Image (tube, rainbow, N blue to C red):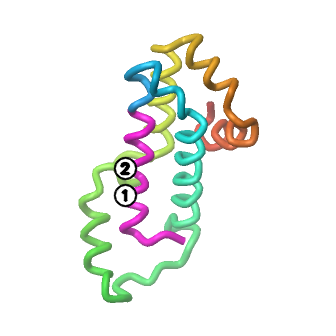
């Protein structure tokens, strides 16, 4: 399980990578890697969600830092759920790139594609 600090950065990395997809067709080349990373971040987020795991607030030397980090997180689950934000980026990329997006999507490993479809409702 990742620390709060790593989850903080991984969420941003996943959103940044997905945000690149609509910008230029060359951003579609690593689509399989981007989808794989985004799905793994979503899975980690699901495992770390408060309703799924028991957390002890204020335990550990980094508790204050982690709480401060979570409070400042502009894309925290309370403010902007990661799944819908990623789904929006991918939907926008499909609309902008059309056939090029679908061609890139067809070359993605079927297992990764199935995980992405389940996690992002594609």
Compare residues 29 and 100 and report the one nearer the observer. Answer: 29
At horizontal 57% and vertical 40% (from top left) the residue drawn is 35
At horizontal 49% and vertical 69% (from top left) the residue drawn is 2
Examine the image and state in which quarter residue 46 appears. bottom right
Q: Which residue appears farthest toward the bottom when viewing the image? A: 60
The answer to whether residue 66 is above or below residue 29 is: below
105 on left or right of 77: right
Q: Provide the residue designation for mark 1.
A: 9
Secondary structure of the residue carrying numbered label 2:
helix
Callout 1–callout 2 Cβ contact below 8 Å: yes
At horizontal 59% and vertical 56% (from top left) the residue drawn is 43
Examine the image and state in which quarter residue 103 appears. top right
Q: Which residue appears farthest toward the top when viewing the image? A: 99
The label shown at residue 41 is none
Is 23 magenta? The answer is no
Look at the image and tell me in which quarter the N terminus lies: bottom right
Please state the horizontal and vertical placement of residue 6, each as a whole percent of the image.
41, 65
Q: What is the chief secondary structure element of the magenta stretch? A: helix
Q: Which residues are magenta?
A: 1-19
Q: Which residue appears farthest toward the right when viewing the image? A: 110
At horizontal 42% and vertical 23% (from top left) the residue drawn is 22
Q: Provide the residue designation for mark 2.
A: 12
């Amino acid at each position: 399980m990742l620390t709060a600090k790593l989850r903080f950065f991984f969420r941003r990395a996943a959103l940044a990578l997905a945000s690149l997809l609509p910008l230029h067709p060359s951003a579609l080349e690593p689509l399989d890697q981007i989808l794989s990373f985004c799905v793994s971040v979503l899975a980690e987020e699901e495992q770390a969600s408060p309703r799924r795991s028991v957390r002890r607030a204020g335990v550990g030397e980094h508790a204050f830092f982690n709480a401060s980090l979570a409070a400042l997180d502009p894309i925290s689950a309370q403010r902007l759920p990661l799944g819908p934000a990623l789904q929006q980026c991918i939907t926008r990329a499909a609309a902008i790139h059309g056939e090029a997006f679908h061609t890139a999507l067809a070359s993605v490993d079927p297992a990764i594609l199935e995980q992405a479809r389940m996690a992002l409702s594609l």
